[in-house]
Amino acid sequence: MIPKLIATDLDGTLLRNDRTVSERTLRALRTANEAGMEVVFVTARPPRFVDALAVDCGLAGTAVCSNGALVYDVGARAVLESRTLSPEAARKVAEALDGAVDGVGFAVETGHKVVFAPGYGHRLPEDTEAEFPVESVDGLWSLDAPFVKLLAWSAEVDADTMLAAAERAAGGKVQFTHSGGSGLLEISASGVTKAGTLAALCAERGIDAADVIAFGDMPNDLTVLEWAGTPYAMGNAHPSVRAAVTRHTASNEEDGVAAVLERLLGAV
């Protein structure tokens, strides 16, 4: 059965390690789109990164950005829906994590920029023009901007350990996850997940979970992979993802998404 919608993560899934989309994968996506399948990017990345991808690859459509906090119209470059974190909730979580994770620093993703406090060292070469410092962590809580995500980073603790510590310290108050960034934890408003936002988007289109094929590689993709009717873990996926998902494809470097779509469409 041909699905109605393709939900794909970007980093480590659709993109190769150099953050490009291969010609083979582009061809598979375009063929799928021509066959009537909608392609939705479901990513931890903010809209500005999706914009750059759209320019480089000519891909447009709808994106679920920032782990479900934003629904973004790529062609119109417009945020259609947002589910943001309150500054007060972010501050309380930061205080809890400061006592639970060694060497932790904090930043706020606003959708347009990353504002970081001293101690936050997760800097992205492709995002330098959008990164802005504040003098102290208290400067984060008075920002006049939406809190799309709170970011917590430590050079001393890996992301899996941070996630477990965060759940013990403040579980249930916000949504914790990670997407494989070294020592990086991503924090959204309570109940905000990739799957929740994607499910609402599909409901608006009259699309059931059974009509969705999904691809992902990291723990923040698990909610989507558990919800979609036909989920695939990438060959390079995090061990928890590979264990949770029975269908596996090749790695992102080996065009694993394209391989599945080609079989689905009868291409060789």
Image: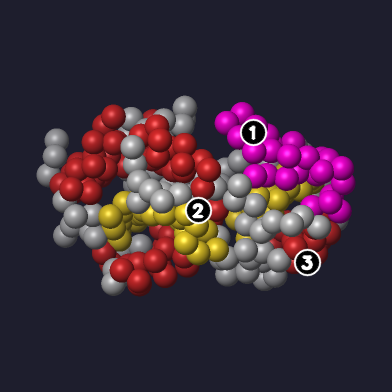
Real-space Cα separation, disc 3 to disc 2, in angstroms: 22 Å
Left of 135 or right of it: where is 5? left
Q: Position of residue 6 (x, y in %)?
A: 31, 53
Residue topped by disc 2: 65
Dot 2 amino acid type: Cys
Residue topped by disc 3: 88
Few, some or many C-alpha atoms within 10 Å of disc 3 (few <14, some 14-19, many ≥20)? Answer: few
Residue topped by disc 1: 129
The magenta stretch spans residue 159: no
Q: Where is residue 218 in the image (x, y as percent from the top left)?
A: 50, 48
Dots 3, 2 in contact, CB < 8 A: no
Name the quadrant of the N terminus.
bottom left
Of pointers 3 and 1, the one earlier in the residue sequence? 3
Instruction: Classify 65 as above or below 167.
Output: above
Q: Which colour assignment does the render follow?
A: secondary structure
Q: Can residue 95 be seen in this view?
A: yes
Few, some or many C-alpha atoms within 10 Å of disc 1 (few <14, some 14-19, many ≥20)? Answer: few
Of pointers 1 and 2, the one earlier in the residue sequence? 2
Please state the extent of the stretch shown in magenta in the rendering: 113-140
Real-space Cα separation, disc 1 to disc 2, in angstroms: 19 Å
Few, some or many C-alpha atoms within 10 Å of disc 2 (few <14, some 14-19, many ≥20)? Answer: many
Dot 3 amino acid type: Glu
Give the image quarter of residue 86.
bottom right
Q: Where is residue 78 in the image (x, y as percent from the top left)?
A: 47, 54
